[in-house]
Amino acid sequence: MTTQNLIEKFESYFGTGSEPQLFFAPGRVNLIGEHIDYNGGNVLPCAIKLGITAVIRKNDSSTILMKSLYTKGMVKVDLNEEINPINGDWGNYPKGVIAFLLQNGIELSGCSILFYSTLPAGSGLSSSASLEVLTAYSLLKINNQKINPIEIALLCQKVENEYIGVSCGIMDQFSVAMGKKDCAILLNCQSLKYEYVPLQLNEYSLVIMNSNKKRELASSKYNERKLECDTVLNDLQNHYSIANLCEAQLYQLDFHIIDETLKRRARHVISENNRVNSAIDALQNNDIKQFGELLTASHLSLKNDYEVSGFELDTIVEESLKINGCIGARMTGAGFGGCAIALVATDVVDIFKEKVSATYYAKTNILPAFYESSIGAGVHELHSYQILKQVQDDISKPYSS
Ligand code: GLA
């Protein structure tokens, strides 16, 4: 898909007229610090070059019309009427953003939007955060409103929590809004203080692997984990002055938490937050092997204590770790299916993919997918000089399920 094709598609749905604007929002992978954001600790995500492009133009009406290249029909929002979600519809993400922008007193004109994605939906690479942040950014831009990426991230998190009904933390929306080329973001989710950490992996590459296991019950299980963590925090706060679960110590669990399941959930959170800090040390000391070991330890904790991985994600991680040259692997994102990452010696990446594909397929009967995606920037407008390059680099291979 070239820019020209994309604009032609846009015109085929919405007619010709003035030149539309193009915007891009990335997906993200979280390197380490999983299920930590809603517990107030440190996470280390980065924006990737796979993402969603919006082609957008004002339409002189009070209606926002939205078309995704992957679904039939169009989503229509009348700016003068109540904007209600429809169960299970992709349009709920942009609709929630429009509703919350209006609630915040932002004036929006009618427009037409075409969405084009290279990001596999529902695979743990934050396609929903990408769509939310992209909608907010594009609408603010075409309406000449002030842009504050952190405020956009917070608004989109609120959409997810209150309009979609998933009690997620801030990590995904923050990474999509604030990503920086070749850098991971060390973000403290309590204070929102952050710093960019250049990701130099020396002779290793980051491989993104899609287990292609669709996530099931993800949002209900996700909300259940959050409740479990809140329960432990409430109990501990009767004894200690802590603001969030990541401030607790492992020994405190032995003293005060009787329920074994709750103890394991909290053990994951506390140990994972410690692993993020160790991962930063490892990167600063240029110790990529240690970084890899921390990734694997993170997976085991998510598998055994937090119980959010599942057969397919465990299998793809285990099969990856069997290959010479793979020094660490873990699921990434919420879990319950979706993607994993592996750190693999660059010169064996092709062999790695071949072997993992074969053994994973033999055990699960599912073919995995691998994405070559380097670390890119957060949400931005595609200006004409960038468009050609961006299209060649990033949006030439659409995701098809
Ligand atoms: C999902 C949520 C994030 C975060 C991760 C797990 O991606 O949207 O807020 O909690 O799961 O780390």
Image (cartoon, rainbow, N blue to C red):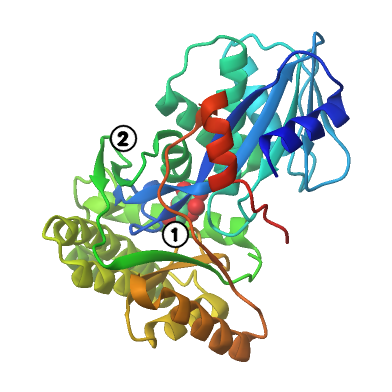
Residue 382 shows in this picture: no
Name the image quarter holding residue 235.
Answer: bottom left
Residue that carries the numbered disc 2 in the rendered image: 192
Q: Considering the numbered disc 2 on the image, is that residue within a helix, a strand or a loop?
A: loop
Kind of residue at disc 1? Glu
In-image side of 320 versus 235 (left or right): right
Q: Mark 2, residues whose alpha carbon is within 10 Å: few (<14), some, or many (≥20)?
A: some
Alpha carbons under labels 2 and 1: distance apart: 23 Å
Q: Secondary structure at mark 1?
A: helix
Q: Is the distance from the Cβ of mark 1 to the nearest ligand 1 atom less than 8 Å?
A: no
Q: Which mark is residue 348?
A: none
Which is nearer the eye, 28 or 373? 373
Give left or right: position of 210 versus 20: left
Q: Quadrant of the C terminus?
A: bottom right
- Look at 39% across and 88% down and name the residue there: 322
Judge whether 226 appears above or below 255 on screen.
above
Q: Amino acid at mark 2?
A: Leu
**Of 264 and 71, the residue lying toward us:** 71
In the figure, 133 relative to 286: above or below? above
Q: Nearer the viewer, residue 329 or 162?
A: 329
Point out the image quarter for the N terminus.
Answer: top right
* Above or below for 51 versus 308: above
Whole-percent x, y for residue 123 in the image: 59, 60
Dividing the picture into quadrants, the one containing residue 139 is top right
Q: Residues within 10 Å of mark 1 (few under 14, many from 20)?
A: some
Q: Could you tell me residue 248's position as x and y percent? A: 22, 55
Residue denoted by label 1: 228
Mark 2 or 1, which is nearer the eye? 2
Up/down of 13 relative to 20, above or below:
below
